[in-house]
Image (cartoon, helix red, strand yellow):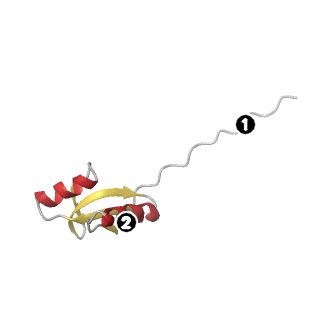
Amino acid sequence: AVAPPAPITQAPPQAAPSYYVVTDYNGAASLESARGAVGDAYVRDFSNGTRIQMGAFSQESSARNLVNQLQGQGIPAQVISP
């Protein structure tokens, strides 16, 4: 008897980011400061105003880890869920 073929398993789809790590945008100096910590930080409009996005995560725990790292560097980051 021939064994049935093994089922093909697919990787679960990546969840869309729903937790964003942001800091306040107060002009070019604040963006430069943010990029000193996260090189690809950028300015983005959220529903509650313009912020600097430092990261985007599908898990809140990952976002909180980045916030803790940034706060340790003196950057007042927070997690938002637009």
Q: Nearer the viewer, residue 58 or 72?
A: 72
Residue 75 on image: x %, y % = 26, 65
How many numbered markers are drawn? 2
| Side (left or right) of 69 relative to 12 | left
Tag 2 residue: 68
Secondary structure at numbered mark 2? helix
Amino acid type, callout 2: Asn
- Compared to residue 11, the image places residue 46 above or below, namely below
- Residue at image position (72%, 36%) is 6
Q: Position of residue 7 (x, y in %)?
A: 70, 39
Please state, as top left, top right, bottom left or bottom right, where the N terminus lies in the image: top right
| Residue extending furthest toward the bottom | 48
- Residue appearing at x 31%, y 62% in the figure: 70
Quadrant housing the C terminus: bottom left
Label 1 crowding class (10 Å Cα cut-off): few <14, some 14-19, many 20+?
A: few
Q: Which residue sits at x=37%, y=66%?
A: 68
Depth check: 47 or 79 in front? Answer: 79
62 sits left or right of 25 in the view:
right
Under circle 1, the secondary element is loop
Viewed as shown, does residue 70 lie left or right of 34?
right
CB atoms of marks 2 and 1 within 8 Å: no
For discs 2 and 1, the disc positioned in front in the rendered view = 2
Percent coordinates x, y for residue 29 in the rendering: 12, 59
Mark 2 surroundings: few (<14), some (14-19) or many (≥20) residues within 10 A: some
Can you identify the residue that label 1 sits on?
A: 6
**For this rendering, which residue is in front, 81 or 34?**
34
- The answer to whether 22 appears left or right of 10 in the picture is left
Amino acid at the residue labelled 1: Ala
